[in-house]
Image: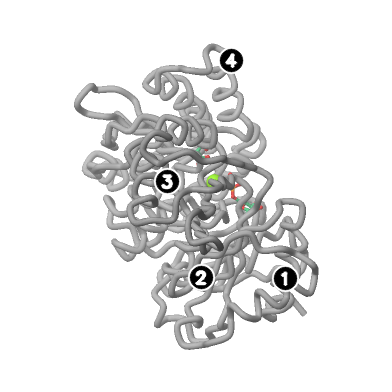
Amino acid sequence: MAVVVMKFGGTSVADVERIRNVARHVKRETDAGNKVAVVVSAMAGTTNQLVAWVREASPLHDAREYDAVVATGEQITAGLLAIVLQSMGVRARSWQGWQVPIETSEAHGSARIAGVDGAMIRSRLDSGEVAVVTGFQGVEPKANRIATLGRGGSDTSAVAIAVALAADVCDIYTDVDGVYTTDPRIVQKARRLPKISYEEMLEMASLGSKVLQTRSVELAMVHRVRLRVLSSFVAPEQMAPVRLENLENIGTIVTDEDEIVEQQVVSGIAYAKDEAKVTILNVEDKPGVAARIFGPLADANINVDMIVQNVAADGKSTDMTFTVQSAELARTLDVLKAAEKDIGRFDVRSSADVAKISVIGIGMRSHAGVASQMFAALADKGINILAISTSEIKISVLIDAAYAELAVRTLHSVYDLDAA
Ligand code: ADP
Ligand code: ASP
Ligand code: MG
């Protein structure tokens, strides 16, 4: 018998018929004697609608009230799933974040989970009941208010509950049957990875592969949670129930590096279209300028990603290019304007029509030439590189957004990732 956390994303619970399908997946597990906590997202499109209403109500809204509104989507799904399970003869009860409780930080809109008390859920499971928990939301204990975990946050709820329950496995059911070498909706030749290391998954997620929220992977890595990604669209009765000895047969398992026998140099390719490029022209080339540019941005909590500084051809002035989230572009320009008296006079250009393409692989630690291969392949397609950043296991380039898909497809072939 296993303790299983099953998380179902928006498309998997898009309507009552699909919720019934989810209930059959849950019943398969309880029929096999497993103890199940389910974590659900809002029905597909619901969170977007809620966010749109909040923005329509006021573009400059209070983050606490944003959370009060957008957290409701998950409440609907949890209640509906409990009802459907009951109608199928499965004992079930729905729970919201505050009832568990799942405690969070004060950062409304993108709160972090501070702690999950698993005792109540655990005793429900021990009594033979299925616990259906709302993803994406918890309670900020100081002000006793509902807080949400940022888009895609139900993945993180699921992992946090798995940690609290010391679950044997945390299964993330979604609309694809695993983690692929790149987004299978963009590249038809993408291949499902039977296993991926926590480190690589963390890079993939943070560099744009939204199949798992970055924080969920972080949390799973720290607590060594056995995390799987699988499809909810496989007929529930055709899947074998969780047995601890057959975990690796389906989907993708996110696991320790040393459990992966066949390691490619590059395991995956991620892309992100939500960055914007800012170029500051003609700033003085002297010590302290970078600090005067990036200090105020840091103070304003604006995350800067890639940075390129040109050499000063005349020895006096230079250009500096960097990227920020495109949602932060307007604020970035405001902060720079306000800092002009410290930075010195400069011209600024910006564009949100850029994409960041990243190749990721643990094998890069011991292989030279991955970057040059990437640059050559992009050059071959006439794709210009605007900025570069690297770490031990990834290389990212910034390019014109129009070439994003071509770049991903090209690199996918170049690194031998295409399915046969
Ligand atoms: P859910 O609503 O179940 O949380 P998401 O839309 O958040 O689902 O995540 C699943 C989607 O992630 C897939 O439909 C796929 O388009 C996208 N995706 C991006 N990169 C990858 C990848 N490398 N492997 C699998 N899916 C990916
Ligand atoms: N419903 C939330 C969202 O759409 C959380 C999630 O689905 O993970 O972002
Ligand atoms: Mg998701």
Q: In the image as oriented, which residue stretches furthest toward the top?
A: 57
Which class describes the residues within 10 Å of circle 1: few (<14), some (14-19), or many (20+)?
many
Residue at the (56%, 30%) spot, across then down: 47
Residue 330 appears anywhere in the view: yes
Residue 394 is marked as 2
Q: Which residue is mark 3?
A: 303
Residue at the (57%, 56%) spot, across then down: 209
Ligand 1 has an atom within 8 Å of the beta carbon of the residue at disc 2 = no
Residues at marks 3 and 4, CA–CA distance in whole angstroms:
26 Å
The percent position of residue 33, horizontal first and vertical second, equals 40, 56
Of residue 309 and residue 84, the one placed in the foreground of this image is 309
Q: Which residue is mark 4?
A: 56
Residue at the (47%, 24%) spot, across then down: 72
The percent position of residue 166, horizontal first and vertical second, equals 28, 57
Q: Which residue is mark 1?
A: 378
Which class describes the residues within 10 Å of circle 2: few (<14), some (14-19), or many (20+)?
many
Amino acid type, mark 4: Glu
Q: Secondary structure at mark 1?
A: helix
Q: Earlier in the sequence, mark 1 or mark 4?
A: 4
Of residue 267 and residue 291, the one placed in the foreground of this image is 291
Q: Earlier in the sequence, mark 3 or mark 4?
A: 4
